[in-house]
Amino acid sequence: MDRRIRWRDRGGSVAYLTMIPSPPICDDHPRTVPCEVAPSREPGVMTKHVILFVAANPHTSNPLRLAEECAEIHRELKLAPHRDDFQFESRWAVSIDELMRHLNELAPTVIHFSGHGARRRSVPGNSGTTRDIALHDTDCGIYLQDEQGHPQLVSPRALAMMIDAAAREARVVVLNACFTATQSDVLRARVECVVGMDGAIGDDAARAFAIRFYGALGNRRSIGNAVDQAVAALAAKQLPDEVLPRCLTRDGIDKYGVFLDPS
């Protein structure tokens, strides 16, 4: 079969074009279907540390100025020389299910809880606005919210299990609420550092602590030094020593050797 095409140009000359047949499609060699591949991380691209700010202020508890605390932490990080090291995320009126969802979604390096801690009834409270709710002597923990906005107590063991299951990347937990230092022993087995309060801390003092703590992290100071800076600021405000923040670490870890450098 002649596969040439005869054509004549304007000058009358005759030329031929030869058609080259396409290769046959063979069923023995099926065409490849593209598949979705997860993008690889570009070399040299910095991965930011996610700071997850979790807030809960149930209806029946003392009203706290958590929105101001969140805004001032965010501002402090934005003003820091190493602000690009961090990605700040805030979540509000958090329930247990929502906290699990946020831990899975964001994979935070730092989990910061601001709200109320449980105070045993036998322990005296504070006359000012504090971050605690009195309970029976056998209870301790932090308060999230249920679907109706009522307090939902989360025990230290339950919180440790949640972090272990849904936030394996977490390295630091900050419990900016009253009577939370006692929970650190359980949590420090899951993360490198846990920061909690030894007593009934006032709302203003808790906010001042958070500002100085994250301001230090924004300058690439260690977790231990960030706590020291926050403690110094609170001491200058004449806060009793027993209410100052405490930092506990996993066995074998030095709090002054824990840095959140970009990875």
Image (spheres, rainbow, N blue to C red):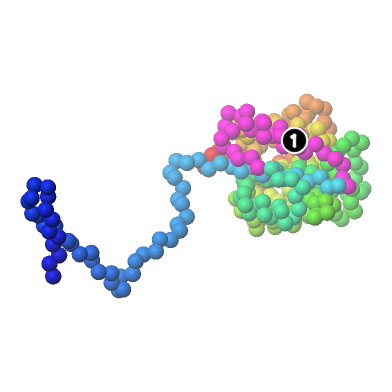
Residue lying furthest bottom: 28
Pointer 1 residue: 69
Residue at left 90%, top 53%?
Answer: 136
Looking at the rendering, the stretch of residues picked out in magenta corresponds to 60-89
Q: Is residue 124 magenta?
A: no
Q: Is residue 156 left or right of residue 82?
A: right
Say above or below: 191 vs 79. below
Residue at left 76%, top 37%?
Answer: 67
Residue 209 point in image, percent of width and height:
74, 34
Is residue 259 visible in the rendered structure shown here?
no
Q: Could you say which quadrant of the image residue 84 lies in?
A: top right
Residue lying furthest top: 236
Q: Is residue 62 magenta?
A: yes
Say above or below: 243 vs 191. above
Q: Quadrant of the N terminus?
A: bottom left
Residue at left 54%, top 39%?
Answer: 262
